[in-house]
Image: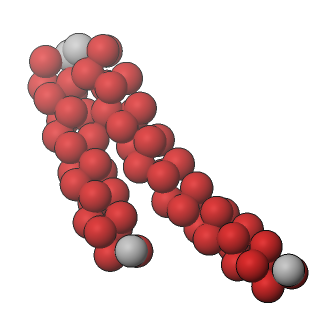
Amino acid sequence: MLIPILIFDVALVAWSLHLMQEAVEQQEFSLMLAGTLVAMAAAAMLVFYFLMGHCLTYLTHAS
């Protein structure tokens, strides 16, 4: 399950970098904000995946 999430995260980061590059070229703040939000969503998805994986492992072994 980790491989599809990593592929999706790489796609999100690539899209984020594309948005930020367009923001610099067009001097558009909203595109920079959108790129930042997309990058933060990719990071949050990875953090959530690892935290929930550890929590579920702990809960299943504690029972």
Name the residue at 22% across, 54% down: 11
Q: Is residue 34 above or below residue 45?
A: above
Above/below status of 1 relative to 61: above
Res 52 → quadrant: bottom right
Q: 25 and 15: which one is in front?
A: 15
Q: What is the residue that sits farthest to the right in this orientation?
A: 62
How many marks are shown on the rendered structure?
A: 0
Q: Position of residue 35 (x, y in %)?
A: 31, 33
Q: Viewer-proximal residue, 16 or 6?
A: 6
| Rendering colour mode | secondary structure
Looking at the rendered image, the quarter that the C terminus falls into is: bottom right
Residue 18 placed where, x, y %?
17, 40
Residue 17 visible, this angle: no
- Tell me where residue 36 sits by quadrant: top left
**Side (left or right) of 46 relative to 17:** right
Rendered-image quadrant of the N terminus: bottom left
Q: Is residue 4 above or below residue 57?
A: above
Query: Which residue of the protein is positioned furthest toward the front in this rendering?
Result: 63
Residue drawn at the location 53% of the way across and 48% of the way down = 44
Q: Is residue 33 visible?
A: yes
Q: Residue at x 21, y 24 (%)?
A: 23
- Camera-side residue of 13 and 5: 5
Residue plotted at (33% across, 57% down): 9
Q: Is 42 drawn above or below residue 52 in the view shown?
A: above
Residue in front for this viewpoint, 19 or 24: 19
Residue 24 located left or right of residue 35: left
